[in-house]
């Protein structure tokens, strides 16, 4: 695969093909390391993750292995977006005052972003890129809040059973 990144400024919302490409490139050590970790021929994996290759896709088993190895958030987003679902990896965050303030700050920041989409809401003519951005930021908030909830539960269970 080329050393030239074909998606240098690809925003947060990617197609599955783009997300597979990005997951391979972003993997620690790149696609060569990913092929090694998956025990897959490098040339074969490169062709399956190539942006403009329409004939070769990872098999369902290979896709599962790529997802498990990379845990790439944009790939997970691309896979769940068509179903209107939100993925969540349980990563408990300590429910401390500082963490709660950080979630509050995130909510303010995301609220400002949502407010900036007034043009779509004003005439009720939403464009695909506006909706995609709105969904992306909404999912970020959901994941942050769920992390705090998981942290609070972990702390509660730790004090009850510890």
Image (cartoon, rainbow, N blue to C red):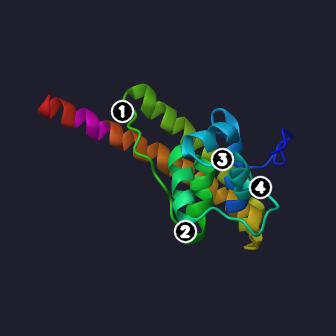
Q: What residue did someone put label 4 on?
A: 50
Of the image marks 1 and 2, the number of the one nearer the N terminus: 2
**Pointer 1: residues within 10 angstroms few (<14), some, or many (20+)?**
some
Residue at image coords 59%, 65%: 59
Q: Is residue 62 above or below residue 154?
A: below
Picture coordinates of residue 16, whole percent (x, y):
67, 61
Alpha carbons under labels 1 and 2: distance apart: 28 Å
Name the quarter where the C terminus is drawn. Answer: top left
Between marks 4 and 3 in the image, the one whose residue lies nearer the viewer: 4
Q: Are marks 1 and 2 in contact (CB under 8 Å)?
A: no
Structural distance between the alpha carbons of marks 2 and 3: 21 Å
Q: Earlier in the sequence, mark 1 or mark 4?
A: 4
SS label for mark 3? helix
Q: Earlier in the sequence, mark 2 or mark 3?
A: 3
Return the residue at label 2: 84
Distance from the alpha carbon under mark 4 to that under mark 2: 26 Å
Label located before the other in sequence (3 or 1): 3
In the rendered image, the vertical position of residue 48 relative to residue 143, given as above or below: below
Q: Residue at x 30, y 37 (%)?
A: 152
Q: Earlier in the sequence, mark 4 or mark 3?
A: 3
> How far apart are labels 1 and 4 at the CA level?
42 Å
Q: Residue furthest left?
A: 161
Q: Which residues are magenta?
A: 152-156
Residue in the foreground of this view, choosing between 129 and 69 = 69
Q: Which mark is residue 46?
A: none
The residue indicated by pointer 1 is: 95
Relative placement, left or right, of 160 versus 41 is left
> Does the rendering let one see residue 153?
yes
């Amino acid at each position: 695969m080329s050393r030239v990144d074909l998606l240098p400024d690809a925003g947060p919302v990617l197609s599955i093909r783009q997300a597979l490409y990005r997951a391979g490139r972003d993997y620690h050590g790149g696609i060569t390391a990913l092929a090694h970790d998956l025990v897959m021929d490098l040339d074969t994996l490169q062709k399956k993750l190539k942006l403009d290759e329409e004939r070769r896709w990872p098999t369902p088993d290979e896709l599962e292995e790529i997802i498990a190895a990379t845990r790439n958030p944009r790939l997970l987003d691309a896979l769940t977006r068509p179903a209107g679902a939100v993925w969540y990896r349980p990563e408990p965050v300590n429910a401390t005052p500082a963490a709660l303030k950080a979630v509050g700050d995130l909510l303010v920041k995301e609220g400002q972003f949502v407010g900036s989409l007034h043009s779509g809401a004003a005439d009720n003519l939403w464009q695909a890129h506006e909706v995609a951005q709105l969904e992306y930021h909404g999912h970020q908030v959901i994941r942050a809040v769920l992390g705090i909830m998981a942290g609070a539960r972990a702390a509660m269970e730790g004090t009850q059973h510890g």
